[in-house]
Image (tube, helix red, strand yellow):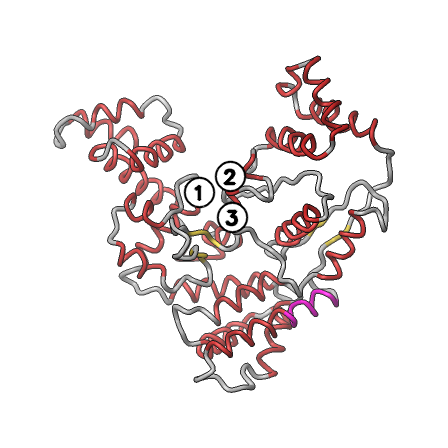
Amino acid sequence: MPAAIHDSSDRAYPPQCHPSTRKCLRERVTKWGIGGGNDGRMLWLLGLAAVGKSAVAQTIAEEFQEAGRLGASFFFSRPNHLNDPDAIIPTLVYQLTTKVPQYKHIINSRLADDPWILKKNRRTQFRELIIEPFHILMTQHPHAREELQIDDGEAQKDVKCLLGIEFDKIRKRYKDCLPDGWPSEGCFHRIVGAASGHLGFASFVLRFIGDKGYGDPDGQLKICMKFLDGGGALGGISPLHSLDLLYRQILSDVPANDLPTTMRILGLLILYSYVSTYIDDLVKFLNLDPARFHRSLERLHSILYVSPPDLPPISLRIYHASFSDFLKDPVRSGRFCLNEGVVQLDIALQSLHWLGHNGKGFTYTITAYAIHLFGFYRTIATITLATTLPPKSLLRRNWVGRVL
């Protein structure tokens, strides 16, 4: 699964640590990686959602690669469906063979003797392609683990550092309307306290306040303070609760006449992540006016990343899986919860639209993906044939009914 490797083109904009954050943790992991600390063969980095595990792992992988010490990487991604367990061992083995000549020699020999190793179960693959070859090349050592804490001294320090740097950038960007002392010390420490060392939360708050779509950082800061004062983490509530409140506020700011379009786009991005995320493709598939498409997302820039316009094709991606989880959970998102049945109906109708009117190119491909995701493997050709009949054909309506 090449898309799961840290430097894959599919990971063009991966999460990364800010140069000034998680420095002590990264130093400890690096020390472990070069054998300067605990000689354990395994280091387990764990933490809550959105705390920055993927960012730390991505940054460490890049640093190890630059130092010539990276063996292999595999980044799971629930939104991008990079979660096939059968692909893990072959992907790691492939990378290791390109890095360690002695290991490559062992693997070549084993695959030559038994080409069906890759068809065996994962336990057997792991033993024959990982354990046994490295048992030959290495000595065994005890395990190490390290937990990614969010409320320790370093994490708190990192949050302060990140907020200070990014607030300074916002203040310079809006120097004509923000005073030198903005934000106040009280607001600054309120955010630090609410974050509880949670870098993901701090990053989201910064995007929310500095959102160019609003162009009003002081107003956004006041909204942020309102929600933090009403349900922040200082009272023992998780920072993710405050995230939920801000997610609701952002969606509430979308004009009522644009919200249905907004939810259609989000539903496609979240529930059908196999589909192209290029804006031009999404506009065509959903049969939307480009101006309406962009207008429906202009309040969501703190949630959605839009690739730079000077690097076409322009694509969309959701910053963090916590927002996807929020929209799937009716308890957390309330009236903004994605109705999976409604999204599926919308995608099915658009698929049939493009099957009936556009039989080539982009639209045919994206339709095949959508139909495939429903599991109707044997009906694609039949639907295509049926849609060549007159629009009012009873047969065509019957096929539509079967798909829906």
Note whether 83 is above or below 251 in the view shown: above
Which numbered marker is on residue 81?
A: 2
- Nearer to me, 54 or 9: 9
Magenta region = 153-161
Distance Cα–Cα, label 3 vs label 2: 16 Å
The image quadrant where one finds the C terminus is: top left
**Which amino acid lies under the numbered mark 3 shown in the image of this protein?**
Ala
Bin the neighbour count of mark 3 within 10 Å (Cα to Cα): few under 14, some 14-19, many 20 and up. few
Q: Earlier in the sequence, mark 3 or mark 2?
A: 3
Name the residue: 52% across, 76% down. Answer: 225
Question: Does label 1 or label 3 sit earlier along the sequence?
Answer: 3
Q: Position of residue 286 (x, y in %)?
A: 29, 46
The kind of residue tagged 2 is: His
- Mark 2 or 1 closer to N-term? 2
Q: Where, quadrant-wise, is the N terminus in this rendering?
A: top right
Q: Do the residues bearing badges 2 and 1 touch, measured as CB atoms within 8 Å?
A: yes
Question: Main SS type for the magenta part?
Answer: helix
Q: Is residue 109 found left or right of 308 in the rendered image?
A: right
Q: Is residue 374 magenta?
A: no
Mark 1 belongs to which amino acid? Ser
Is residue 68 toward the left or the right of residue 140 in the image?
Answer: left
Look at mark 1 in the image and give the residue it sits on: 273
